[in-house]
Image (cartoon, rainbow, N blue to C red):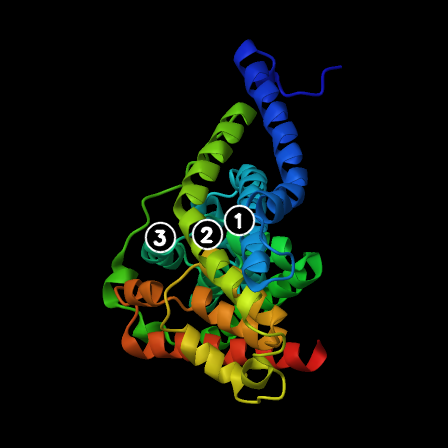
Amino acid sequence: MNSFPKDLKNNHSRQIIALLFVAILLWLLAYNAIQPVANYISYNLLRLTPGSHLGDAIAFFLYDVPKILLLLSGMIFIISIFRTFFSPERTRALLSGKRQGIGNILAALLGIVTPFCSCSAVPLFIGFVESGIPLGVTFSFLISAPIINEVAIILLYGLFGWKIAAIYILSGLTIAILSGLMIGRLNLERHVEDFVWKVQSTGALLEEKLAWTDRILRAWESVKEIVGKVWSYVIAGIAVGAIIHGYVPESALAGIMGKQAWWSVPAAVLLGVPLYSNAAGVIPIVSTLIEKGASLGTALAFMMSVVGLSLPEIIILRRVLKPPLIAVFVCTVALAIIITGYLFNIII
């Protein structure tokens, strides 16, 4: 009995599957060749001295750039196939009618797998509210989606390993759930702009049925779109990281961003909130800061504040939220990030 779905049995489907297997093989070969190729270019072709500042910086750059771009391409493809089962419309349907508590947990989890960007914050917020989803549950989603996105997870895994990536995901979920619960209990619905409550539902949501070939093709389009948007941030972030890696002495940052500096976590959050970057640009820098003596909690708090409280998203949300609610949102999330940073510094 053939285990493939029926839509994979025609010639076009077979061609797509064959190309997919070839792409997987080429990806594996390229990934395993990164380290020797980077070393060969740095120390043989360029004749740089191993252990020198410039040699280490160039080798670091030539190794990390292709590694991260390959990881991004491969993991985004897999996650994008999974995401075809969780459209924003389906997310609204799943969350509709859910109360505080269970709703916050489900919203935070769905934030990981639902496509999201700053430009979609307003329509998603309006859609959630007009579907009857509580305000606190809506915020759990809006907090989780940008912090725990596929780019952040992939980069954290590539640079730190699964342990740190898993800790980051767990902490991001905790922040989203607790912040949403707190905002929900404050009964701040009066600080949502009046027009949001007047938006009427357009009716039942239509769920799009996709064949497996369509899911594969959509995943490929997502790879091209996302990598096309973030590759320059990846290169810029790794370039900064390479300079720090090659030229900043070991433990140089311990006095500024180490565990002993009690003020480093809130200072990192305050610095990160007004900055505008994405995970692709900030994570390579965070990785190198930790290598040079910055504590894990301080570095991850800085990263979370940059990607979770981005200034463009706050400005966009002003269209649907009044200033008091925006202030509560920013302060609640910032406080949760600071507490998480301190806990990381104490435990790890």
User: Judging from the image, what secondary structure is the residue with disc 2 in?
Assistant: helix
Which mark identifies residue 65?
1
Q: Is residue 117 above or below residue 249?
A: above
What's under tag 3, amino acid-wise? Ser
How many residues crowd mark 2 within 10 Å: few (<14), some (14–19), many (20+)? many
Marks 2 and 3, how far apart in space? 26 Å
Whether residue 186 can be seen here: no
Query: At which x and y percent is residue 76?
Result: 54, 42
- Which label lies toward us, 2 or 3? 2
In terms of image quadrants, where is residue 306?
A: bottom left
Residue at image location 39% in from the left, 46% down from the top: 229
How many residues crowd mark 1 within 10 Å: few (<14), some (14–19), many (20+)? some
Considering every residue shown, the one lying at the far left of the view is 195
Q: Earlier in the sequence, mark 2 or mark 1?
A: 1
Is the residue under label 1 in contact with that under label 2 (CB below 8 Å)?
yes
Query: At which x and y percent is residue 74?
Result: 58, 39
The residue carrying mark 3 is 120
Residue at image location 31% in from the left, 74% down from the top: 191
